[in-house]
């Protein structure tokens, strides 16, 4: 069987379907915002203002097998959508019940208001456990306006009926015991994606040392399937 094409964000993603584009969390490392600004002809996509492309729900999604999924609303955050929009996405997933979908948000607590079908995997990003990060004590609020990762962890703990994926990317400095305990505390956790920032030369995030990340991965592997993304020395290690 020929190997299926995957997108750059997640290896097992068969395709990205973006009936909503845009986000107001203003994460400094956001690659999607920079790409949309450079390449999109849609004015709202160009500014990354949350808006809809509902016509993208009219076409059948690609079939998925095994660990594969279709990424929904990855070019933004679905929680900036209205109740009616999120319910329409849920109906789309119910219609294509023989496919698996991934819906990921940095505000997962809002998603807890909805009932997602069994074929939807719910995901979030947890880059760190700290409120102030690294030797420079960088406030998390300077990196992202999204709810703090501890609040996201609290929401993911509540999920009982859907599988869960957590993405630790871009990995920021962390307390290993706390991160490990958080992952253990998510009942339906199946996959942990982990990797460094893809543009370290631009963002200079408060990254942990490579050795620390490798040690964390070793502790996470008994908890869930760990999918390694870009694993490299921290940007500051190269200059030491």
Image (spheres, rainbow, N blue to C red):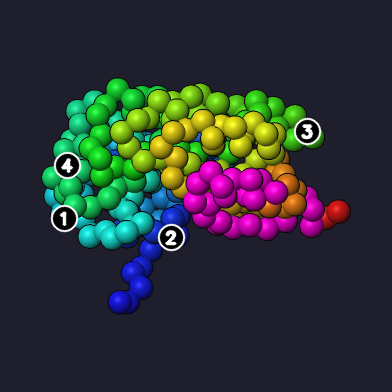
What's the magenta region? 215-238
Asked if the residue at tag 2 contacts the one at tag 4, i.e. Cβ–Cβ closer than 8 Å, the answer is no
Q: On the image, numbered disc 3 is attached to which residue?
A: 136
Front position in the image: 232 or 98? 98
Real-space Cα distance between discs 4 and 3? 47 Å
Q: Is residue 48 visible?
A: no
Q: Name the side, left or right, on which 178 lies relative to 60.
A: right
Q: Residues within 10 Å of mark 2 (few under 14, many from 20)?
A: some
Element at badge 3? Answer: loop
- Residue 167 placement, left or right of 143: left
Where is residue 182 shown, x and y percent of the image? 56, 32
Q: CA distance from mark 1 to mark 3?
A: 48 Å
Q: Nearer the viewer, residue 86 or 157?
A: 157
Residue at left offset 55%, top offset 57%: 229
- The residue that disc 1 covers is 60
Tell me which label, 4 or 1, sits earlier in the chain: 1
Q: Residue at x 44, y 33 (%)?
A: 187
Residue bearing the label numbered 2: 11
């Amino acid at each position: 069987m020929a190997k299926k094409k995957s997108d750059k964000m997640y290896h097992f993603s068969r395709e990205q379907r973006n009936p909503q584009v845009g986000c107001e969390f203003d994460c400094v490392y956001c690659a999607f915002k920079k790409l949309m600004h450079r390449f999109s002809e849609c004015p709202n996509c160009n500014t990354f203002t949350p808006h809809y492309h509902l016509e993208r729900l009219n076409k059948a999604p690609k079939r998925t097998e095994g660990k594969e999924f279709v990424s929904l609303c990855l070019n933004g955050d679905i929680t900036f959508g209205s109740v009616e929009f999120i319910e329409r996405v849920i109906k789309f997933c119910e219609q294509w019940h023989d496919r698996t979908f991934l819906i990921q948000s940095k505000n997962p607590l809002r998603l807890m208001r909805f009932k997602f079908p069994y074929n939807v995997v719910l995901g979030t990003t947890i880059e760190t456990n700290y409120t102030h990060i690294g030797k420079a004590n960088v406030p998390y609020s300077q990196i992202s306006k999204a709810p703090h990762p501890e609040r996201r962890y609290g929401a993911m703990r509540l999920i009982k009926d859907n599988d869960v994926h957590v993405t630790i990317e871009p990995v920021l400095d962390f307390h290993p015991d706390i991160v490990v305990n958080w992952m253990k505390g998510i009942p339906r956790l199946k996959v942990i994606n982990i990797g460094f920032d893809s543009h370290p030369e631009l963002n200079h995030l408060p990254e942990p040392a490579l050795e620390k990340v490798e040690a964390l991965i070793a502790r996470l592997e008994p908890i869930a399937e760990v999918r390694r993304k870009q694993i490299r020395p921290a940007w500051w290690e190269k200059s030491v």
